[in-house]
Image: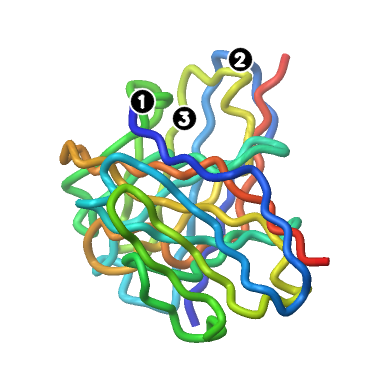
Amino acid sequence: EVQLVESGGGVVQPGGSLRLSCAASGFTFDDYAMHWVRQAPGKGLEWVSLISGDGGSTYYADSVKGRFTISRDNSKNSLYLQMNSLRTEDTALYYCAKDISGGNSGPGYWGQGTLVTVSS
Amino acid sequence: SYELTQPPSVSVSPGQTARITCSGDALPKKYAYWYQQKSGQAPVLVIYEDSKRPSGIPERFSGSSSGTMATLTISGAQVEDEADYYCYSTDSSGNHRGVFGGGTKLTVL
């Protein structure tokens, strides 16, 4: 059974940093690209970032490019999102999601999310 | 930046057919994906690659795409199908960036 468990969310001041983690199990982790998707309170879904299965290719939404870094440790079956220079508009529930196939097909299975609140 | 456009809301009576549209300039070249999100829950994939249904998704859910519009159809909508629905795709520039539509609230009553 596929399981994705996000952690690392919390309250941080504007300009601060936070590192999110996503622990994966139930599938061959390095066979799949992984996504981060966020959802601000009461708002729609926003795609944030994608990393290839081998970690060699990364892609970002314009809204986070230059501030967020996606990475993965395939030996630990873990996905990460390093978030720097946080802004109040980054407040959201952050989901990690397994790609549908090996490449960039789109988010398939989703975790339950971890909440990030950026506030002074 | 690339955008996908959905109607904010769709309302049907139980047993009727619900159709939710998603328009985007790159849809003739890129697949559309559809997600269902019930209140307080994580999204669930209901259609991928325009028209394929994942295992476990009821047959009443179907998808199609023509030109710049993709459509999610729920044939014989049930009360439990009431949820927010989002389309997803990527733009055609080759930058691999994903984009979600704004979401459609489906009311079944």
Mark 1 is surrounded, within 10 Å at the Cα level, by few (under 14), some (14 to 19) or many (20 or more) other residues, namely few
Give the Cα separation between the discs numbered 2 and 1. 19 Å
On the same chain, marks 2 and 1? The answer is yes
Nearer to the camera, B105 or B93 = B105
Q: Are marks 3 and 1 in contact (CB under 8 Å)?
A: no
Circle 2 is placed at which residue position? A14
On the same chain, marks 3 and 2? The answer is yes
The residue at the point 53 percent across, 45 percent down is B6
Give me the chain letter of mark 3: A
Mark number displayed over residue A83: 3
Mark 3 or mark 2: name the one nearer the start of the chain: 2
Residue A13: image x %, image y %? 65, 18
Q: Is residue B4 left or right of residue B57?
A: left
The residue at the point 48 percent across, 17 percent down is A85
- Position above or below: B59 against A92: below
At numbered mark 1, what does the secondary structure look like: helix, strand or loop? loop
Circle 1 is placed at which residue position? A62
The quadrant the C terminus of chain B occupies is: bottom right
Q: Is residue B82 left or right of residue B45?
A: right
Give me the chain letter of mark 2: A
Q: Quadrant of residue B17?
A: bottom right
Q: State the scheme by which the image is colored.
A: rainbow
At numbered mark 2, what does the secondary structure look like: helix, strand or loop? loop
Mark number displayed over residue A30: none
Q: Nearer the viewer, mark 3 or mark 1?
A: 1
Nearer to the camera, B48 or B8 = B8
- Dot 3 amino acid type: Met
- Position above or below: A27 against A103: below
- Dot 2 amino acid type: Pro
Give the Cα separation between the discs numbered 3 and 2. 11 Å
Q: Quadrant of residue A14?
A: top right
